[in-house]
Image (cartoon, coloured by chain):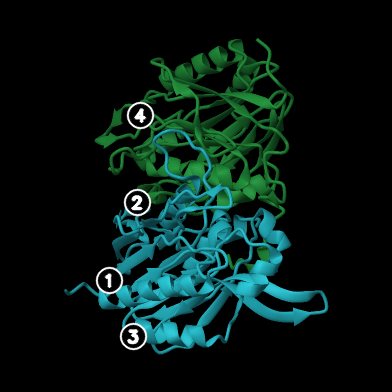
Chain colours: A green, B cyan
Amino acid sequence: MSFSTNQARIRCTQLAPRIGDGPGNLAQIETELASAASDGIDLLVLPELATSGYSLTPSEARDAALPADSPVFARWQAILGEHTSAVIGFCEHGGEDPSGVLIYNSAVILTPGSAPTIYRKLHLWDTEKSIFTPGSDVPPVVDTPFGKLGTVICYDLEFPEMPRSLALRGADVIAVPTNWPYISRPENEHAPEVVHAMAAARASGVAIACCDRSGEERGTVWTEGTTVVGTDGWVTGEMAASGRYDAAVELAGDRRRISPRNDVFGDRRPEFYEL
Amino acid sequence: MSFSTNQARIRCTQLAPRIGDGPGNLAQIETELASAASDGIDLLVLPELATSGYSLTPSEARDAALPADSPVFARWQAILGEHTSAVIGFCEHGGEDPSGVLIYNSAVILTPGSAPTIYRKLHLWDTEKSIFTPGSDVPPVVDTPFGKLGTVICYDLEFPEMPRSLALRGADVIAVPTNWPYISRPENEHAPEVVHAMAAARASGVAIACCDRSGEERGTVWTEGTTVVGTDGWVTGEMAASGRYDAAVELAGDRRRISPRNDVFGDRRPEFYEL
């Protein structure tokens, strides 16, 4: 298969991690990495906390946590090979401070030829606040073979400043590992988090790839709302029975020029925004 | 009728102004002001450039333009009475500078007991750039009997910074006079501008009332996409055959507290946003 250089093949696999089964969770992640590499995927996105499951007790979180320099990530990069990049949510052991072990809700960004990059979720949802320490670094924008890749995690996306900042910093695609608890919505509407992704994508001409999880976990039902949004703000791609959602997104350089006289970045008037 | 103090009755009337017929345009505006007042509406929103039509030549724009201190606005306020506020898009004569007459794409905000407030569109769309001068003031947030009212015009809404700024400055409702040229979209999707309104409303717990125009004008077909979005981000209200779209929106003070531990403003991490 051959693709235009302005197109990226994105896959999100809607896994169902299991609490307490670290080896099983890592094995299913590695199956997906190998499959994405062999299918020539440019970017694979896996869910938030794919290594551990979500509804953790503090001690389960500590037991499942991997440090940022875990050899697991080098192994994953080797599986991905010379072409495929990936963003994978994981439970991070961030060392200790006087208050105890620091656990982060993180994502690792892997791309050929670079060391792993770690992003720690900035905006924690509900009970996450009693388990995880919030991040304290600006989210990364990483150079990959297909373009510049930004990453946020789940609730982060509901802050319009986040995808906007990443796009202004040059992101062509934003990966969003998520675990979306199901929220009821009016008939014929997208999940509300998808509405955020659609608006953010169109506002900044950036593609957004949200990888949700599946299954039920300790009473939480998930939205199973995995969705890729193109740079025009519309949903693209398709979920297969395998849980793999594949999409080809156009990343043309002129995508932010939306009329003969308009450019979504050039038209900004930041001196009048009070944020 | 009686309503909870946290509810606002909003009406958007999807008028079809006609170029060159200033008296007719003002007459239909005044019919709507009187009707909204007599129906006990809290906020009436009318389209962008409701006084003049949209696809103007520069000389037509100059001929149609009203100054900010036009007696028309005092008359409108008298028609609205002691209860009803309104936001009306108009073509503004802003005086002259060495380059010539300054024409703005503006909105007048009328509320009982206050002088008219003028907002001049900050982000101009396409050929508007050859007719109008862009605004150079932060959009107003005006105290009204039903709550705090922000205003943006049409393309302004596509900059996520705009509704976010207004909500952070206290707006309960954002009025959006618009003229949306029709853009094709996938089946079963809202107009893309409505997707922006939905995401912005949910992100900040603010209601957004977009009043589009109707009819065809010099070859432009309009979306006729008038929509009110509640503070939960979902579409509310209904369009009548008369072109009047009525909605009752809840403005409860706790609407930004979305879980026992989450508040959409309190959870922000502005030190990590690069805007």
Rendering coords of residue A253 (x, y %): 73, 36
Q: Residue furthest right?
A: B98
Q: CA distance from mark 3 to mark 1?
A: 21 Å
Residue linked to disc 3: B81
* Badge 1 and badge 2 in a common chain: yes
Q: Amino acid at mark 3?
A: Gly
The residue lying at 67 percent from left, 53 percent from top is B126
Tell me the element at label 4: loop
Say whether residue B82 is left or right of residue B223.
left
Marks 2 & 3 on one chain: yes
At label 1, which amino acid type do we have?
Asn
Name the chain under label 1: B
Residue B234 shows which numbered tag?
A: 2
Q: Secondary structure at mark 1?
A: loop
Upstream in the sequence, badge 3 or badge 1? Answer: 1
Residue furthest toward the left?
A: B1
Please state which of residues B134 and A58 is positioned toward the viewer in this rendering: B134
Is residue A133 visible in the rendered image? The answer is no
Q: Position of residue B148 (x, y in %)?
A: 41, 75
Whether B226 is drawn above or below B46: the answer is above
Give the Cα distance between marks 1 and 2. 18 Å
Viewer-nearest of labels 3 and 1?
3
| Image quarter (top left, top right, bottom left or bottom right) of the C terminus of chain A | bottom right
Asked if disc 2 and disc 4 are in contact, CB closer than 8 Å, the reply is: no
Image quadrant occupied by the N terminus of chain A: top right
* Residue of label 4: A19
**Residue matched to label 1:** B6
